[in-house]
Image (tube, rainbow, N blue to C red):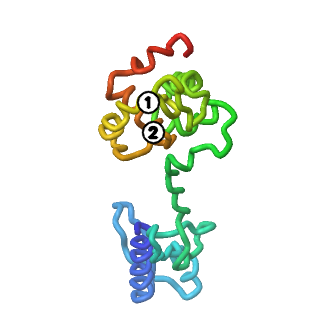
């Protein structure tokens, strides 16, 4: 917009110069005074006006011309839109070979300083298997949530009605437990492992 305003000012100045048949110069008192020009002088004193960049009617509200002085055509994008953040479901590994494969998903929910510990707990509790079920209890999923505690925990964490074997919900509820539900103490029974 500033370039367009400069263009208009330059255009009005040029029209005024042409209308008066002269140019302007600064006197010693720092104000503009008209000066008569001959026909051959007009090209020398004509201001070099910036080429306006048209505002494209696209969703981004403008464009980046490829080089200075070029005109932007409608429909050209200023910059590509940023990629949409992935869903945590996009971070679920297709083939799980170790608990490390869950790192991107764990990183979605846990603070950077807690990611390694969360991965170690997944390794100890479920060996990285989202469908893991303890044969001696109702503990299930990556973080081995107890079936009796899951409905209340998942609801408080904002995952009401989700399946304990849903790896995203399982990790999300574990993160909620760490940050809002008592910390890492929920996995004290396996603390010697992690």
The residue under the point 36% across, 70% down is 32
Q: Secondary structure at mark 1?
A: loop
Location of residue 164 (image quadrant): top left
Count the marks: 2
- Residue 171 placement, left or right of 123: left
The residue under the point 40% across, 69% down is 1
Q: Point out which mark residue 66 bears.
A: none
Q: Give the residue at mark 2.
A: 164
Spot occupied by residue 173 in the image (x, y as percentages of width and height):
40, 35
Mark 1, Cα crowd under 10 Å, few <14 / some 14-19 / many 20+, is many
* Quadrant the C terminus occupies: top right
Spot occupied by residue 178 in the image (x, y as percentages of width and height):
39, 26
Spot occupied by residue 36 in the image (x, y as percentages of width and height):
45, 82
Q: Nearer the viewer, residue 138 or 175?
A: 138
Q: Where is 107 relative to 18, above or below?
A: above
Q: Secondary structure at mark 2?
A: loop
The residue under the point 48% across, 28% down is 144
Q: Farthest front residue?
A: 136
User: Decide: marks 1, 2 in contact (CB < 8 A)?
Assistant: yes
Spot occupied by residue 185 in the image (x, y as percentages of width and height):
39, 17
Q: Nearer the viewer, residue 126 or 158?
A: 126
Q: Where is 18 relative to 63, above or below?
A: below
Estimate the spatial distance between the alpha carbons at disc 1 and disc 2, rounded to whole Å.
7 Å
Q: Give the residue at mark 1.
A: 145
- Residue 25 placement, left or right of 133: left
The residue under the point 59% across, 25% down is 123
Q: Nearer the viewer, residue 28 or 144?
A: 144
Instruction: Of the two numbered discs 1 and 2 on the same chain, state the one appearing first in sequence.
Output: 1
Q: Nearer the viewer, residue 120 or 16?
A: 120
- Residue 52 placement, left or right of 128: left
Mark 2, Cα crowd under 10 Å, few <14 / some 14-19 / many 20+, is many
Location of residue 158 (image quadrant): top left
């Amino acid at each position: 917009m500033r370039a367009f305003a400069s263009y208009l000012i330059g255009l009005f100045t040029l029209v005024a110069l042409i209308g008066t048949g002269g140019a302007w110069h600064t006197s010693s008192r720092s104000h503009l005074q008209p000066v008569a020009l001959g026909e051959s002088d007009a090209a020398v004193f004509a201001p070099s006006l910036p080429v306006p960049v048209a505002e494209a009617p696209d969703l981004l509200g403008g464009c980046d011309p490829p080089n200075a002085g070029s005109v932007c055509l409608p429909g050209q994008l200023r910059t590509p839109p940023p990629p949409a953040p992935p869903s945590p479901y996009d971070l679920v590994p297709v083939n799980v070979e170790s608990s490390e494969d869950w790192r991107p998903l764990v990183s979605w929910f846990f603070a950077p300083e807690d990611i390694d510990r969360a991965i170690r707990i997944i390794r100890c509790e479920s060996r990285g298997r989202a469908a893991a079920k303890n044969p001696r209890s109702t503990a299930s999923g990556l973080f081995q949530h107890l079936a009796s505690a899951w409905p209340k925990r998942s609801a408080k964490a904002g995952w009401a009605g989700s399946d304990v074997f849903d790896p995203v919900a399982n990790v999300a509820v574990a993160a909620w437990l760490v940050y809002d539900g008592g910390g890492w103490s929920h996995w004290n029974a396996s603390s010697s492992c992690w």
